[in-house]
Amino acid sequence: MAICVRKNCTTSVWGKNKERSKRLCKRHYAAYVQNRIAKEAKALSVCYYCGLSLAKMRNKKYCCKAHRQLGSRKILGKIITDIIGFSYWGHIQHHIKRSPIELASINGVHDITGLYQLYQCKTKHQRSYVLALEQWGVSKEKLKIKPIPLLRLEICHFYPVNSGGENTPDNVIIAPLRINRMLKDTIPYQGRLFPGLKALRKKMPLNGSLYDGLVARFGKKVVDEELSSIGKLKHFHGNYAKQPEFGGMHHEFPLLMLLISELLRLGHHDIVKFLQAIRRDYESLLPVYVELVSIIMFYAILTGDRDRFLMRFMRIHRWFDDTALSTRHPFRAWGRDNYERCMYLLLRRYLRLFFGSAIESPREIVDLYNSFFSLQVVDVGELGEIVSFSYFKGRQSKVNTFFIIPEYVLDTLPRSGDVFGIGSTLS
């Protein structure tokens, strides 16, 4: 008599013709029938919400998270479902769970919407692009492409969230990723400028999803109304190429414009006034120096101006440019050349201190600036000038800009005043 073909089974095959045709014992034939019924049911299964076939998915009831939420009536409204399904929501939830006080790190649902809108703003400043699939050497069926940010940015907390900082728009700034990673979770200097905000409430655990936690704390109606104010979102499905578009460092000043935008949002109009004056005076002649000021200032802001760059920067600018002080302060008599001398020396000192780069070296300046981007945006020309690259419809163009190091940059300042609060020599 035949033996069951299943491994390690010595039971004889007998009984019905169907069992004998498969050469299975009674127990294994019953399991075979159940598996076949399950496969047929899976082949016919569809999403409970949209009717999409689930035959090639591991999901049992819904084709995706959003439709599970809609189908199970956890969330009412497609707009809110899209908001929660976006990666921005996941980033915010991650920051809240990193906090030792979790939900107590926010003041209300308006903080969540404010952070969400900051992520949307970050996306605009990043100028993301997508290379053609052929450049990756893969087919559309095998890979879902993610956008590549031209300008690498992060949402940075002034007071680190894992040290008890608030998860609120007033405690964060959109800043270059490189600088944020350099500083990691450094607590800023607790002075007058940019000390950050530390939450003082007791821990409120976040059990489950962020949406459920918000509903439990603030109520479903309040949460849904606040989230609806974000509006409709733009989706990228990762199935088409998008060429990088960038007008060039000399034309767009990406870091300066980001810095001005964030300082205006945070209410630091006095610093913005100085930055706009510097751009107005030097954008056509020395654009790379305008961007260097922005790079140093981002670092200073995230450290709470621990090394007093902002204080010195604003002091010098007031001495030379503020007409209200011109009749009673001797520094204005130094003239424009000495103003530029002070600023060059200030940049020289802090570029070396923060990034280890020498302002006298065009190559070091170019390497530093390119490190904030995913594409080459500047280079050193044959005569030592700075070449600025722009991108449009897959084509790269270049424009030469000046890079001037006057001899007096390496000299010391005259002894007629303590310009930097530490004596007249910057080294």
Image: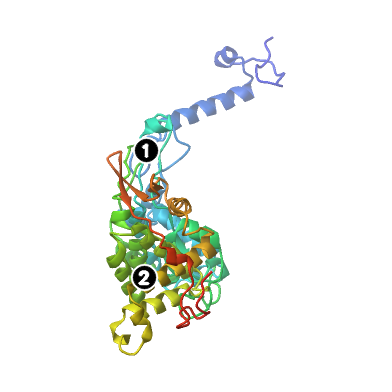
As drawn, 386 above or below 202: above
Q: Mark 1 points at which residue?
A: 131
Rendered image quadrant of residue 228: bottom left
Residue drawn at 51 percent across, 58 percent down? 357
The location of residue 58, given as percent across then percent down, is 48, 37
Q: Which of 73 and 157 is in front in this view?
A: 157
In this rendering, position of residue 228 left or right of residue 206: left
Say which amino acid is labelled 1.
Leu
Q: Element type at marker 2?
A: helix
In this rendering, position of residue 282 left or right of residue 416: left
Q: Residues within 10 Å of mark 1 (few under 14, many from 20)?
A: some
Q: Do the residues labelled 1 and 2 touch (CB within 8 Å)?
A: no
Q: Which of 371 and 230 is in front in this view?
A: 371
Residue drawn at 51 percent across, 74 percent down? 425
Question: Quadrant where the C terminus lies?
Answer: bottom right
Q: Earlier in the sequence, mark 1 or mark 2?
A: 1
Q: Mark 2 points at which residue?
A: 263
